[in-house]
Amino acid sequence: MKKILAYPLTILYYLFFGLVLVVLHPIQWIAFKLGGYKWHKITVDWLNFFVTGCLYILGTKISFNNKYKLPKNVPLIVVSNHQSMNDIPPYFWFLRKYHPKFVSKKELGKGIPSVSINLRLGGSCLIDRKDSKQSLRAIINFGKYIEKNNYTAVIFPEGTRSRDGVPKRFSENGLKVLVKSAPSAYVVPVTINNSWKFLKYGGFPMEIGVHLTYDVHKPIKASSMEFEKLFKKVVTEIKSAVVV
Protein backbone atom coordinates (compact mmCIF):
# COMPACT_ATOMS: atom_id res chain seq x y z
CA MET A 1 0.00 0.00 0.00
CA LYS A 2 2.80 2.39 0.88
CA LYS A 3 4.54 1.86 -2.46
CA ILE A 4 1.26 2.33 -4.35
CA LEU A 5 0.73 5.67 -2.61
CA ALA A 6 4.30 6.62 -3.48
CA TYR A 7 3.51 6.76 -7.25
CA PRO A 8 1.09 9.72 -7.26
CA LEU A 9 3.09 11.53 -4.57
CA THR A 10 6.28 11.10 -6.59
CA ILE A 11 4.57 12.55 -9.68
CA LEU A 12 3.46 15.55 -7.63
CA TYR A 13 6.95 15.91 -6.19
CA TYR A 14 8.63 15.94 -9.61
CA LEU A 15 6.06 18.39 -11.00
CA PHE A 16 6.57 20.91 -8.20
CA PHE A 17 10.34 20.31 -8.10
CA GLY A 18 10.65 20.97 -11.83
CA LEU A 19 8.42 24.03 -11.61
CA VAL A 20 10.56 25.54 -8.85
CA LEU A 21 13.76 25.01 -10.86
CA VAL A 22 12.32 26.50 -14.06
CA VAL A 23 10.75 29.54 -12.38
CA LEU A 24 13.73 30.41 -10.18
CA HIS A 25 16.29 30.05 -12.98
CA PRO A 26 15.64 33.41 -14.73
CA ILE A 27 14.96 35.08 -11.40
CA GLN A 28 18.45 34.10 -10.23
CA TRP A 29 20.02 35.55 -13.37
CA ILE A 30 18.08 38.81 -13.11
CA ALA A 31 18.85 39.13 -9.40
CA PHE A 32 22.56 38.65 -10.03
CA LYS A 33 22.65 41.17 -12.86
CA LEU A 34 20.74 43.82 -10.90
CA GLY A 35 21.94 43.26 -7.35
CA GLY A 36 25.09 41.13 -7.58
CA TYR A 37 25.90 38.51 -4.97
CA LYS A 38 23.54 39.92 -2.32
CA TRP A 39 20.39 39.70 -4.42
CA HIS A 40 21.41 36.40 -5.94
CA LYS A 41 21.93 34.95 -2.45
CA ILE A 42 18.38 35.89 -1.50
CA THR A 43 16.96 34.07 -4.52
CA VAL A 44 19.11 31.02 -3.77
CA ASP A 45 17.80 30.93 -0.21
CA TRP A 46 14.23 30.93 -1.51
CA LEU A 47 15.10 28.36 -4.17
CA ASN A 48 16.29 25.94 -1.53
CA PHE A 49 13.39 26.74 0.76
CA PHE A 50 10.99 25.62 -1.95
CA VAL A 51 13.08 22.66 -3.13
CA THR A 52 13.41 21.43 0.44
CA GLY A 53 9.68 21.99 0.86
CA CYS A 54 9.00 19.70 -2.11
CA LEU A 55 10.32 16.80 -0.03
CA TYR A 56 7.41 17.25 2.35
CA ILE A 57 5.08 16.20 -0.46
CA LEU A 58 6.59 12.76 0.04
CA GLY A 59 5.78 12.82 3.74
CA THR A 60 9.41 13.52 4.57
CA LYS A 61 10.49 14.64 8.01
CA ILE A 62 13.74 16.63 8.19
CA SER A 63 15.73 17.07 11.39
CA PHE A 64 18.83 19.28 11.56
CA ASN A 65 20.30 18.39 14.94
CA ASN A 66 22.91 20.81 16.20
CA LYS A 67 23.72 21.14 19.89
CA TYR A 68 26.82 23.24 19.21
CA LYS A 69 27.15 26.92 18.43
CA LEU A 70 28.87 27.27 15.09
CA PRO A 71 31.67 29.86 15.18
CA LYS A 72 30.83 33.21 13.63
CA ASN A 73 32.96 35.50 11.48
CA VAL A 74 35.28 32.67 10.49
CA PRO A 75 35.28 30.34 7.50
CA LEU A 76 33.68 26.95 8.05
CA ILE A 77 34.40 23.68 6.27
CA VAL A 78 31.47 21.29 6.58
CA VAL A 79 32.53 17.69 5.94
CA SER A 80 29.78 15.17 5.40
CA ASN A 81 28.89 11.74 4.11
CA HIS A 82 26.82 11.75 0.92
CA GLN A 83 23.75 9.63 0.18
CA SER A 84 21.73 11.42 -2.52
CA MET A 85 21.27 14.75 -4.26
CA ASN A 86 18.51 15.42 -1.72
CA ASP A 87 21.29 15.99 0.83
CA ILE A 88 22.07 19.37 -0.67
CA PRO A 89 18.98 21.68 -0.58
CA PRO A 90 18.49 21.33 3.21
CA TYR A 91 22.17 22.26 3.66
CA PHE A 92 21.61 25.45 1.69
CA TRP A 93 18.51 26.27 3.74
CA PHE A 94 19.59 25.37 7.27
CA LEU A 95 23.05 26.90 6.85
CA ARG A 96 21.92 29.90 4.82
CA LYS A 97 23.25 32.53 7.23
CA TYR A 98 26.71 30.95 6.86
CA HIS A 99 26.71 31.29 3.04
CA PRO A 100 27.25 27.62 2.12
CA LYS A 101 29.15 26.79 -1.09
CA PHE A 102 29.79 23.32 -2.45
CA VAL A 103 32.65 21.41 -3.98
CA SER A 104 30.90 19.85 -6.99
CA LYS A 105 31.83 18.04 -10.17
CA LYS A 106 31.96 20.33 -13.19
CA GLU A 107 29.19 18.43 -14.98
CA LEU A 108 26.66 19.96 -12.58
CA GLY A 109 27.65 23.43 -13.76
CA LYS A 110 25.77 23.06 -17.05
CA GLY A 111 22.33 22.05 -18.20
CA ILE A 112 20.34 21.92 -14.96
CA PRO A 113 17.88 24.79 -14.47
CA SER A 114 18.56 26.84 -11.32
CA VAL A 115 21.14 24.35 -10.02
CA SER A 116 23.85 25.03 -12.62
CA ILE A 117 23.48 28.81 -12.54
CA ASN A 118 23.60 28.77 -8.75
CA LEU A 119 26.84 26.77 -8.74
CA ARG A 120 28.42 29.09 -11.31
CA LEU A 121 27.28 32.45 -9.91
CA GLY A 122 27.05 31.62 -6.21
CA GLY A 123 30.72 30.93 -5.58
CA SER A 124 30.77 27.13 -5.44
CA CYS A 125 33.78 25.12 -6.62
CA LEU A 126 33.46 23.11 -9.84
CA ILE A 127 36.14 20.48 -10.33
CA ASP A 128 37.06 18.18 -13.18
CA ARG A 129 37.69 14.76 -11.68
CA LYS A 130 39.67 13.77 -14.75
CA ASP A 131 42.01 16.76 -14.43
CA SER A 132 43.88 16.74 -11.12
CA LYS A 133 45.68 20.01 -11.82
CA GLN A 134 42.44 21.84 -12.53
CA SER A 135 40.84 20.36 -9.42
CA LEU A 136 43.78 21.41 -7.27
CA ARG A 137 43.75 24.99 -8.56
CA ALA A 138 39.98 25.24 -8.16
CA ILE A 139 40.01 24.03 -4.56
CA ILE A 140 42.94 26.29 -3.64
CA ASN A 141 41.09 29.31 -5.02
CA PHE A 142 37.90 28.15 -3.32
CA GLY A 143 39.70 27.90 0.02
CA LYS A 144 41.08 31.40 -0.35
CA TYR A 145 37.59 32.63 -1.28
CA ILE A 146 35.91 31.27 1.87
CA GLU A 147 38.86 32.47 3.96
CA LYS A 148 38.53 36.02 2.64
CA ASN A 149 34.74 36.21 3.01
CA ASN A 150 34.17 33.96 6.05
CA TYR A 151 31.88 31.73 4.01
CA THR A 152 31.19 28.01 4.39
CA ALA A 153 32.53 25.24 2.17
CA VAL A 154 30.64 21.94 2.07
CA ILE A 155 32.60 18.94 0.86
CA PHE A 156 31.67 15.28 0.45
CA PRO A 157 34.95 13.33 0.70
CA GLU A 158 33.32 10.10 -0.50
CA GLY A 159 33.17 11.59 -3.99
CA THR A 160 30.23 9.42 -5.07
CA ARG A 161 26.96 8.87 -3.26
CA SER A 162 26.38 5.83 -1.10
CA ARG A 163 23.45 3.82 -2.52
CA ASP A 164 22.72 1.90 0.68
CA GLY A 165 23.78 4.30 3.41
CA VAL A 166 27.06 2.50 4.12
CA PRO A 167 29.83 5.14 3.84
CA LYS A 168 32.39 4.69 1.11
CA ARG A 169 36.08 5.46 1.51
CA PHE A 170 36.73 9.11 2.39
CA SER A 171 39.42 10.80 0.30
CA GLU A 172 41.59 13.25 2.21
CA ASN A 173 42.92 15.28 -0.73
CA GLY A 174 40.17 17.88 -1.14
CA LEU A 175 39.83 18.58 2.57
CA LYS A 176 43.60 18.80 2.98
CA VAL A 177 43.86 21.48 0.30
CA LEU A 178 40.89 23.39 1.73
CA VAL A 179 42.32 23.40 5.24
CA LYS A 180 45.66 24.64 3.94
CA SER A 181 44.01 27.35 1.81
CA ALA A 182 41.69 28.53 4.60
CA PRO A 183 43.97 28.41 7.67
CA SER A 184 41.54 30.12 10.05
CA ALA A 185 38.68 27.73 9.25
CA TYR A 186 36.79 25.48 11.62
CA VAL A 187 35.95 22.01 10.36
CA VAL A 188 32.40 20.88 11.10
CA PRO A 189 31.70 17.13 10.71
CA VAL A 190 28.08 16.30 9.83
CA THR A 191 26.42 12.89 9.52
CA ILE A 192 23.50 12.43 7.13
CA ASN A 193 21.12 9.53 7.62
CA ASN A 194 18.33 8.03 5.49
CA SER A 195 18.74 10.21 2.39
CA TRP A 196 19.62 7.12 0.34
CA LYS A 197 16.15 5.73 1.04
CA PHE A 198 14.56 8.26 -1.33
CA LEU A 199 16.06 6.26 -4.20
CA LYS A 200 15.22 2.87 -2.76
CA TYR A 201 13.20 2.06 -5.90
CA GLY A 202 15.54 3.85 -8.30
CA GLY A 203 13.86 7.25 -8.22
CA PHE A 204 10.37 6.26 -9.40
CA PRO A 205 8.59 5.98 -7.22
CA MET A 206 10.53 7.76 -4.51
CA GLU A 207 10.26 6.37 -1.02
CA ILE A 208 7.74 8.19 1.16
CA GLY A 209 7.82 8.89 4.89
CA VAL A 210 11.62 9.18 5.07
CA HIS A 211 13.10 10.79 8.18
CA LEU A 212 16.10 12.68 6.80
CA THR A 213 18.51 13.66 9.57
CA TYR A 214 21.61 15.83 9.83
CA ASP A 215 23.67 15.39 12.98
CA VAL A 216 26.21 18.18 13.52
CA HIS A 217 29.32 17.23 15.49
CA LYS A 218 31.55 19.56 17.48
CA PRO A 219 33.42 22.09 15.31
CA ILE A 220 37.20 21.67 15.28
CA LYS A 221 39.64 24.51 14.66
CA ALA A 222 41.62 23.24 11.69
CA SER A 223 44.93 24.61 12.96
CA SER A 224 44.53 22.96 16.38
CA MET A 225 46.03 19.63 15.27
CA GLU A 226 47.99 17.98 12.48
CA PHE A 227 45.92 17.26 9.42
CA GLU A 228 46.28 13.47 9.66
CA LYS A 229 44.85 13.51 13.18
CA LEU A 230 42.13 15.97 12.16
CA PHE A 231 41.08 13.86 9.18
CA LYS A 232 40.93 10.67 11.22
CA LYS A 233 38.85 12.38 13.91
CA VAL A 234 36.41 13.85 11.39
CA VAL A 235 35.92 10.58 9.51
CA THR A 236 35.46 8.62 12.74
CA GLU A 237 32.82 11.02 14.05
CA ILE A 238 30.87 11.06 10.80
CA LYS A 239 30.89 7.29 10.29
CA SER A 240 30.18 6.44 13.92
CA ALA A 241 26.82 8.23 13.70
CA VAL A 242 25.67 6.58 10.46
CA VAL A 243 22.65 4.35 10.95
CA VAL A 244 22.14 1.66 8.31
Image: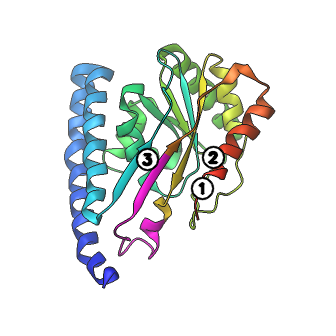
In the rendered structure, find residue 88 and report the number of the disc placed on it: 3
Residue contact between numbered discs 2 and 1, judged by CB atoms under 8 Å: yes
Q: Is residue 22 left or right of residue 60?
A: left
Residue 148 visible in the snapshot: yes
Span colored in magenta: 197-214
Q: Amino acid at mark 3?
A: Ile
Q: Position of residue 102 (x, y in %)?
A: 49, 37
Residue holding disc 2: 238
In the displayed structure, 225 sits above or below 244; it is: above
Q: Amino acid at mark 1?
A: Val
Q: Considering depth in this image, is 173 or 194 the residue closer to the camera? A: 194
Specify the principal SS of the magenta part: loop
Count residues near mark 1 (Cα–Cα under 10 Å), then give few for <14, some for 14-19, many for 20+. some
Residue 158 visible in the snapshot: no
In the displayed structure, 12 sits above or below 228; it is: below
Q: Is residue 101 left or right of residue 58?
A: right
Residue 211 sits inside the magenta stretch: yes
In the displayed structure, 18 sits above or below 172; it is: below
